[in-house]
């Protein structure tokens, strides 16, 4: 597997590219996000929201996020 195909393969396996995770922040609080592999979500503890990841693409919209208890 080459470096060019690695991100595609990771998405097929349900993994987010770690380089992408380093760049993403919560759109509301601008704080770092935690990656929940099981639920395929990016979690913002500060905003108490979990942003879904669909087909390897983070959906960074507050309207699409799940409220954390």
Image: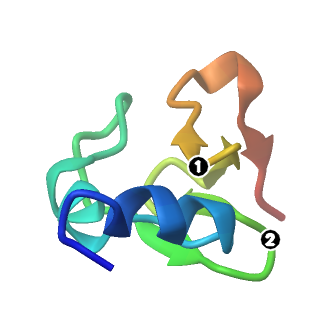
Is any part of residue 21 visible from this angle? yes
Q: Is residue 68 above or below residue 58?
A: below
User: What x and y, as percent, mark residue 9?
Assistant: 51, 67
Q: Nearer the viewer, residue 5 or 69?
A: 5
Q: Quadrant of residue 30?
A: top left
- The answer to whether the residues at label 2 and label 1 have Cβ atoms under 8 Å apart is no
Q: From where the camera sits, is residue 44 visible?
A: no
52 or 3: which is nearer to us? 3
The residue lying furthest to the front in this view is: 1
Q: Quadrant of residue 43?
A: bottom right
**Where's residue 56, x and y in %?**
58, 49
Callout in the foreground (2, 1): 1
Position of 60 with respect to 12 (left or right) is left
Identify the residue under disc 2: 39
Mark sitting earlier along the chain (2/1): 2
Q: Quadrant of the C terminus?
A: bottom right
Helix, strand or loop for disc 1: loop
Q: CA separation, marks 2 and 1?
A: 12 Å
Q: Quadrant of the N terminus?
A: bottom left
């Amino acid at each position: 597997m080459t470096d060019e195909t690695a991100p595609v393969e990771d998405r097929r396996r349900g993994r987010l590219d770690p380089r992408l995770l380093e760049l993403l922040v919560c759109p509301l609080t601008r704080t770092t996000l935690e990656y929940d592999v099981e639920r395929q979500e990016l979690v913002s503890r500060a905003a108490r929201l979990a942003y879904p990841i669909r087909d390897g693409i983070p959906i960074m919209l507050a309207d699409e996020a799940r409220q954390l208890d």
